[in-house]
Amino acid sequence: MRSRTEVLTAEFLPHLPPLVADFVKADGPGSWIWVLLWSKDGPIGIMGISSLEARTYSSNDENMMVAVGRQLATTIEKVRLYEETCKAYEDLRKTQEQLLQSEKMSAVGQLIAGVAHELNNPLTAILGYAQLLESEGLNDRATDFVRKLFKQAQRTHRVVQNLLSFARQRKPQKTDVDIRKIVDETLALRDYDLKVNNIVLERETMVDAPSVTADPHQLEQVFLNIINNAVDAILEGGKGGKLKVRIHSADGQVRVEFLDSGVGIKDPNRIFDPFYTTKSVGKGTGLGLSICYGIIKEHGGDITAHNRAEGGACVEVKLPASGRVIEAEPVTMVTRREMAIEGRVLLLEDEEAVLEFERDVLVGAGAQVVALMSVDEAKSRLRAETFDAVIMNGRMPGGWSAQDAHRWIGVACPGLEKKLLFTFSNVAEADVKNYLQSNGVPSLVKPFEVVDLISQARRLLQKTQAAIAN
């Protein structure tokens, strides 16, 4: 026998794996030659010939079988290596697609952040002046117009914030959330597409729903992926259709069902597998629902999908209820409340419309306001004059950040850094937010309510009045 056995003989059968030994024995008592096929790592198969009649095989027969076996083993090994190479190449291609998609999303996030900044500034003025107008004693018709203006401006703001929160790269932050609100905000992102494509949206929800402990932005990502797939499935079946979203609770869980009238799911058992997609080339990476699956599992929940008997598909998300019941909050317009304030305020903004709005609010409430748009001029006035409070944009052009401004004012005008309010066009970055919180500096995110600006200004000025009294 060769050191690496190639030709099998009867005495070698007991040493073979049972499955192989049984296969060889099945040839019966006739004559046979079986050859083991070897790769560099070990045996990969067997090859043989047999005869029902007694026959003596020569050494030449054995050598020929060994030669053929070696050639076959080499071919099998090459095929295996080729398949592994193809798989590695495909994995690399998919990884590159992921990277490209990630870079695209990063670029989209930066673009949306810029758009949010540009839109939130004029929205601050529009919403603010709408509130001021309502307090001017207008007739009923004019008041109705103002309310409609306010409502549509709020809607625009919500769309901007939804886009911004979806595109923002951030670490998961779980908190008690109202899942109805997240679903509504996500649906608002596709509201236009649903209407244009004649897709009827139906909602079935609870008046009082338990909260869930979750990261709202991650849930928004999950719901948007599901809605996008539902819309694609409906459009694949022809123009128009129906999407129903049902929210209910059972067995300690809050459940959200997305039921569509589309073409259904080709393979529900694989729908959450990475890189599995039924979309045409260029329209899907197969990553969306697999990511959704991971997010929901990480939240202690479950996500399932199945085809409906009446047609279309149903995707259901289940999340553990946190126990606290959140009552539905009616959307109402907050009108201006008169809160007289006294004191001298330096106001610094980079947008003229926002600057004028904030000045009008503060002056109307009784403050003396110096309104500026230049950082250099603001520094000059702060050095030369006395102010009771400073309200300024936390991201002024020229690199004067909220942290820089707070430190500079603390050195140039000791004590005034405690009477400082920053405004931001969108939520401040984590490092800025942490800095402001650790130093007790308040902030407002645009667009804010008139009453919020007056309340914050009043708190700052009360600090000055308290210091004077002492």
Image (tube, rainbow, N blue to C red):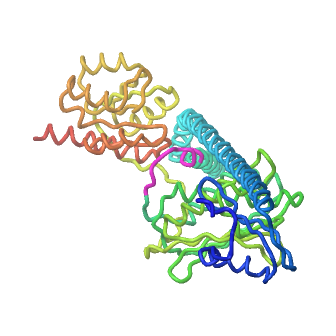
Compared with 316, 193 (above or below) is: above
Residue furthest to the left: 470
The residue drawn where x is 79% and y is 55% is 68
Q: Is residue 184 visible in this depiction of the protein? A: no
Magenta part of the chain: 163-173
Task: Pinpoint residue 29: horizontal percent, then vertical percent.
Answer: 78, 83
Task: Pinpoint residue 138: horizontal percent, then vertical percent.
Answer: 58, 46
Q: Would residue 364 appear left or right of 382 to someone viewing this image?
A: right
Q: Would residue 308 appear left or right of 468 to someone viewing this image?
A: right
Q: Quadrant of the C terminus?
A: top left
Compared with 92, 222 (above or below) is: below
Q: Quadrant of the N terminus?
A: bottom right
Task: Pinpoint residue 126: horizontal percent, then vertical percent.
Answer: 57, 39
The residue drawn where x is 48% and y is 40% is 426
Residue furthest to the right: 238
Q: For residue 221, what is the image quadrant?
A: bottom right
